[in-house]
Image (tube, grey):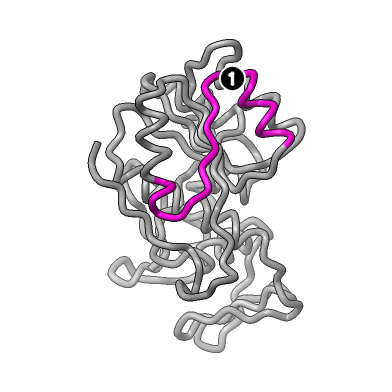
Amino acid sequence: MNSLTIPELSENQNDTSFNPARILLIEDDREVSHSVAELLRNKGYHCVQSFNGREGLVMAINQNFDLILLDKMLPELDGLELLQRLRKYKDTPVLMLSACGAEQDRIDGFNGGADDYLPKPFNTTELELRIVALLRRSRNHNKPVRSGAIITDGDLVLDTHNQQLTIAGQEVELTPIEFELLKTFLGHKDEVLSKPYLYQLVLKKPFSRYDRSLDMHVSNLRSKMNMPDEAKRIHTVRGQGYCYK
């Protein structure tokens, strides 16, 4: 494995009140499990290991975790079935790990409630980035939003309380979905947001590669923001999703 370097998630790394993220690793390959767990613990995360699906499900339901790394092929209870049962009780972020990298397997994972999917063998740097992104999204999503909060980006002003957008002093009318999309992009500037993540968070429905509704909403939002191609704020990242810069 490559060396895994995971940056701290606290805003102030010297803040002793920072609570390290609790990660549940459900992986039956003990060599892989021990390697990943050791790397995470060396970076200050609290990592709990499980080696079969039935035990992992019990731990995931009865304990509180910030993130679950879930293998697809597990003894006693398959990873997809585990995920479907878990979603009846908790919405803990789940990153699925699987040697099955076929597109249908990824779609099944997302439809089952996974937040992200990483095929094996994986590069540990990519695993690092996905873990950090999922933890950041989860913690930001759980933060209370102040009433009347204003988000600004240059000449763009988004009033999240009154659900109003103005650009260069001109009010821009948005649909509720377009407003939520823009607010999500502004909350994750310079971060690539996958389509499955946006489907779940904004559209409130499972991702499907045949569904172009997200692309349509993004296109309409770009048009209403009246940005020329060379100054687009919402960028398409081929094969991944969208990024607001």
Q: Is residue 129 above or below residue 52?
A: below
Q: Is residue 12 left or right of residue 243?
A: right
Q: Is the residue 220 above or below the residue 111 in the image?
A: below
Q: Position of residue 62 (x, y in %)?
A: 74, 35
The quadrant in which the N terminus is found is top left
- Residue 21 or 99: which is nearer the viewer? 21
- Depth order, front residue of 108/232: 108
27 drawn magenta: no
Q: Where residue 119 sits: x, y (%)?
A: 36, 29
For the record, the magenta segment spans 40-62
Q: Is residue 237 left or right of residue 8?
A: left
Residue sitting at x 66%, y 25%: 84
User: How far across and how far down the image is residue 135, in percent?
Assistant: 52, 53
Q: How many marks?
A: 1
Q: Between residue 234 and residue 229, name the one nearer to us.
A: 234
Q: Residue furthest bottom?
A: 169
Does residue 172 appear in the picture of this structure?
yes
Q: Position of residue 140 (x, y in %)?
A: 59, 62
Compare residues 145 and 69 and report the one nearer the observer.
69
Describe residue 168's horizontal placement relative to residue 6 as left or right: right
Q: Quadrant of residue 166?
A: bottom right
How many residues crowd mark 1 within 10 Å: few (<14), some (14–19), many (20+)? many
Q: Is residue 54 magenta?
A: yes
Which residue appears at 37% of the width and 55% of the height?
Answer: 6
Q: Find disc 1 in the rendering and name its residue.
A: 53
Work out whether 71 lies above or below 76. Answer: below
- Residue type, numbered disc 1: Gly
Please report the residue visible at 37 percent of the width from the left and 51 percent of the height from the top: 129
Extreme residue in the top direction = 76
Q: Secondary structure at mark 1?
A: helix
Residue at image x 66%, y 61%?
175
Is residue 211 something one can see in this rendering?
Answer: no
